[in-house]
Amino acid sequence: MVCVNHRDREAVAQCSECGAYICAECANKTEPLKSVCGTLCPSCYRNKITQTHDYYAGQRKKKLASAIVSLICYVVGWILAAAGPGMVFTLIGIVLMGIYPAIAWFRFAGKSIDDYDARHGATYVVTDTGVHRDRAMWLRVVFFFAGLVFGIFITPINIIRWFISAAKNNKAAKICEEQLASI
Ligand SMILES: [Zn+2]
Ligand SMILES: [Zn+2]
């Protein structure tokens, strides 16, 4: 058997992913992933690292977006609440400060209710206008306000956590890029 990439070289191993035969030099290049994925050919190695890179790059983008959007909402909200001309601005400011967790909790409640309905069957209510599906809107609203109040205190911590997480994901993505460049 000869190496899939070097037709003049004897194969010493087989890729655990695609079954291709590879020479010692090719096996050596993919060594960093051997303990996790087994022996890989350079092409499968590249695929694995690209997948890993895309995951970290996706997380980096997500965490960074969360951090920036939350930071802007929080700062603008705080300014409005502290220095806004009147009660309405103060209220809008307070809502803005906790809006990110509030929306997340509202969605979480909605998803949990939908999951529950999917498993146990939806509940219906009869009103003057007919039969409606009970979407438990009050529960979603309760979660929204709980998230809002909680969010006012927890958002600064979340922002820091998201920035740290974005930095970690950025580092991991960069390592993947270096590995891709070196093969
Ligand atoms: Zn392969
Ligand atoms: Zn080779």
Image (spheres, rainbow, N blue to C red):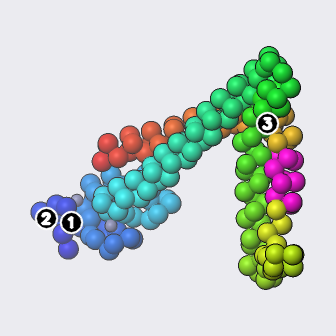
Query: Mark 1 CB in 8 Å range of ligand 2?
Result: yes
Left/right of residue 45 with respect to residue 2 in the rendered view: right
Q: Amino acid at mark 3?
A: Val
For numbered disc 3, what is the local secondary structure? helix
Left/right of residue 177 with respect to residue 138 in the rendered view: left
Report the residue marked by disc 3: 95
Q: Examine the rendering and report whether any part of residue 166 can be seen.
A: no
For numbered disc 2, what is the local secondary structure? loop
In the image, residue 29 lies at what x, y percent? 33, 52
- In the rendered image of this protein, does residue 179 appear above or below residue 39? above
- Precedes in sequence: disc 2 or disc 3: 2
In the image, residue 169 lies at what x, y percent? 55, 42
Report the residue marked by disc 2: 7
Most common SS among magenta residues: helix
Q: Is residue 151 magenta?
A: no
At 63% from the left and 35% from the top, the residue drawn is 69
Badge 3 crowding class, 10 Å Cα cut-off, few under 14, some 14 to 19, many 20 or more, is: many
Q: Amino acid at mark 2?
A: Arg
Q: CA distance from mark 1 to mark 2?
A: 6 Å
Task: Select label 2 or label 3 by which is in front.
Answer: 3
Kindly indicate whether the residue at mark 2 contacts the one at mark 1 (C-beta within 8 angstroms).
Answer: yes
- Precedes in sequence: disc 1 or disc 3: 1
- In the rendered image of this protein, does residue 116 appear above or below residue 27? below
Range of magenta residues: 138-147
For numbered disc 1, what is the local secondary structure? loop
At 37% from the left and 59% from the top, the residue drawn is 47
Which of the labelled discs sits on residue 3, or is there none? Answer: 1
Q: CA distance from mark 2 to mark 3?
A: 67 Å
